[in-house]
Amino acid sequence: MNRTKGDEEEYWNSSKFKAFTFDDEDDELSQLKESKRAVNSLRDFVDDDDDDDDLERVSWSGEPVGSISWSIKETAGNSGSTHEGREQLKSRNSFSSYAQLPKPTSTYSLSSFFRGRTRPGSFQSLSDALSDTPAKSYAPELGRPKGEYRDYSNDWSPSDTVRRLRKGKVCSLERFRSLQDKLQLLEEAVSMHDGNVITAVLIFLKRTLCKEILFRELEVRQVALRHLIHFLKEIGDQKLLLDLFRYLDRTEELALSHYREHLNIQDPEKRKEFLKTCIGLPFSAEDSAHIQDHYTLLERQIIIEGTFSSPINLKKTFKIPDKQYVLTALAARAKLRAWHDVDALFTTKNWLGYTKKRAPIGFHRVVEILHKNSAPVQILQEYVNLVEDVDTKLNLATKFKCHDVVIDTYRDLKDRQQLLAYRSKVDKGSAEEEKIDALLSSPQIRWKN
Amino acid sequence: MAFPHRPDAPELPDFSMLKRLARDQLIYLLEQQHEVDKLYKVENKPALSSNEQLCFLVRPRIKNMRYIANLVNADKLAGRTRKYKVIFSPQKFYACEMVLEEEGIYGDVSCDEWAFSLLPLDVDLLSMELPEFFRDYFLEGDQRWINTVAQALHLLSTLYGPFPNSYGIGRCAKMSYELWRKLEEEEDGETKGRRPEIGHTFLLDRDTDFVTALCSQVVYEGLVDDTFRIKCGSVDFGPEVTSSDKSLKVLLNAEDKVFSEIRNEHFSNVFGFLSQKARNLQAQYDRRRGMDIKQMKNFVSQELKGLKQEHRLLSLHIGACESIMKKKTKQDFQELIKTEHALLEGFSIRESTSYIEEHIDRQVSPIESLRLMCLLSITENGLIPKDYRSLKTQYLQSYGPEHLLTFSNLRRAGLLTEQAPGDTLTAVESKVSKLVTDKAAGKITDAFSSLAKRSNFRAISKKLNLIPRVDGEYDLKVPRDMAYVFSGAYVPLSCRIIEQVLERRSWQGLDEVVRLLNCSEFAFTDMTKEDKASSESLRLILVVFLGGCTFSEISALRFLGREKGYRFIFLTTAVTNSARLMEAMSEVKA
């Protein structure tokens, strides 16, 4: 129900009128003029309520609203509220009294006189505009005086009704009383693709059909069904939503929907209690386990000081995979620069009591993580040495300047050339340089090159 | 750098008109009120204003209505009378009015609409600024914005002439197009007799190509968006960029002369370009040496301002580049990109999977981890069940169990799924449907629908040649195809589809691709019989992205335009990127 041309036209005129009168600045004016030209180049698509345009707008200062409601509102006096006219809806609030009366001439405003003057020659008069109105759509209404055709408004077909709704007009749905009529209306709305209108019809159906019938009919109308589900989610009608999922036998969505509610609970104790109610719900098998974990986790957090919360214990309870555990623990300990703990993390004892270093994530990752947490070279070196693949080891050692590892590796590879090349990379007169020199002149090594 | 357009490339229409229209409309709406003195952001807290009237400019959302209702009802309780006005943009929804009615404030507030649905972010980019479109439609299946899209198209066609040739792919594209046609019919004659300015229109649903939107961006504008988030065409550069203690809000569009030359460039070229530019600038400054007084006067009055402006822009973008470099180095961007490319090409799946696993375990970033999982899922037609379960479990343990709601969303949207043996599925399905009534069969089909809708990325990629065969190095300085926006590794699927259809002026010969995209019923062509379109207008193409487009896609199509002598105009529901898509699917505490 976007702004129609009629409104823009009108807007333009009153707006420009003001600019014209009070604002002499040329720049503004010429810009406005251009806009006007643009607006005018939109051809007038005049609504049948176009003549309302000529009414003075009563805005804030007008009387506060009586009761207007678009379509979905009961009361016998509904014919009044079916009166189309966005103007009334928009700003003039004393609507019901207005609607009953034929339009008094006195409501023509001062600005409507000026309008004629400020419009350029291309001004389309009301009659011009009306003659342009596509006759097919509004034919039955055109000939009649307003007050009269209002009574006929109840005769709109589903397609007329949907079109009016689409344009954001007031339109009664009350006449659609038989189930068949209601469904026809819904199908018409769906065929137009406009979600706003589909939802409008659904709101009406929700109010006028018992839920079993509503659910039954929507089950075979998937597009409408999706709209109802989203609508219920948005307005937070959790009860009806759960009923709907139950009816549709969508057990998993039912469970998830219920579970979602915990996000709105602030108090940890209450949250925990709520999660307890989720545990038995028909989640998928894997999700059931996650929900159970979530509950246990909250329980733990509440008694965090207890011994149940040692990292190892948590790992066991939540079946945290080795990799994940090690990565988390490693990052945490490295941040605290607790190198002994890091060491312990990778030390395993075999059944004979020998200790062995093992890292489920590979020592090359360990080195990188340690480096990121600015571990000293001595520590890095230790772990670089544990990297099995020689190329990776050399790369890392070079990257992180673990000279000893590089030198030892080249020695083990008996690669004289590389060692010689590396000599230029270490500081002059350093211990490393001495070490290289000693190796290079050692007669015990059989260099391969 | 910054390749010029071909001399025969058409001129772009002037979209500033849209801005003025919208602005004037808003001024008019506000004018109706007396003295709007201050604008507040709608947040869920009491209004501080002591004003006698309150005006709310809001998106039509239930939660905004609840906020307004609370406020009005609190006023009522306190015996305070004020006037309230709600201006919905771009339109009012019936559901909103229903809430106002239910909350008992229907008569107390008056409603209006500001039909502002097209914001020209740049000379060739129109945004509807509806990021919620993506979730509303692609997750919830809510079609509330389709009318807005149709109205926007209608406005464009009234301003810039009819669209003689239209193409589209996707369910939403088809519906939007149909509704737009309906509007045109209803206001028959509106554009009759006018010469079309825009020769081709192409509508495309985001879900026909999730892959492109999920990739890390490496053209400058995309990278800036990924790193700093461009909002409404402007970006907040923090102190790390401005090298001062202040943040700076910078407009990024064609008017920024420095930016417009680097925006479409692969990041690896940008540094070189900027330093060249800096040298030129220095040389121009240096010219002032040896000037006599008159020349100096000229220099100061005419050139200096421009040079200073350029200087300012240059240092900003250099700062931005440095900051991007720093961030990317820290997050091992190289390795990340390597993994993405492997996923796109479909090799080393095991390595990629364990890379993602480690990403999750190290709690690098919940959004990034999710993005990589989705990329793996879509390129592989779903994760194998064992991986799905293990990655999901680790994700929940790393980032919080409530994310199982996120996983449910992703599955529904088809972004992250579990592999199912496809053939047996259809066999079971058809068997079942023979046995039971239609209605029940429909139900079963629906239950299977998320599984049945396979992404088929690998097959599509093969058909459309999305992974260029490269001999030797891909020269990013002289791009040869649209793949340059992803370092030469991948031609964006969405852009390739558009290119192919424009070449053929139809979907002919693309049946297999369309089928693989699950769009057999939703690919359409509509050509008008009478051809009044000038050859110039036939090279002006409006591309409509439903659900958002990325800067990489824009850059790729701009490139294609330069190659073929087209100009593209982009209309998107919002500019998006991988992080925004993932956030739209995330379900976490408010």
Image (cartoon, coloured by chain):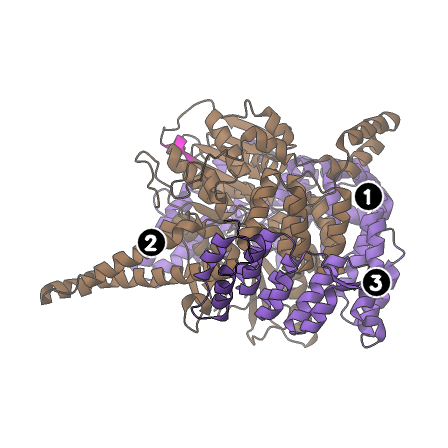
Chain colours: A purple, B brown
Q: Residues within 10 Å of mark 1 (few under 14, many from 20)?
A: some
Residue B535 colored in magenta in the image: no
Depth check, front residue: A62 or A253: A253
The residue under the point 51% across, 43% down is: B152
Residue at label 3? A316
Depth check, front residue: A275 or B339: B339
Residue found at the far front of this picture: A443
In this orientation, does residue B209 appear?
Answer: no
Residue at label 1? A214
Please identify the dominant SS of the magenta region.
helix
Secondary structure beneath label 2: helix
Q: Measured from the top left, where is residue B115 in percent x and y?
A: 52, 51
Give residue B257's mark.
2
Residue A294 shown left or right of residue B344 in the figure = right
Query: Which residues make up the magenta segment?
Result: B536-540
Q: Measured from the top left, where is residue B412 in percent x and y?
A: 72, 45
Residues at discs 1 and 3 in contact (Cβ within 8 Å): no
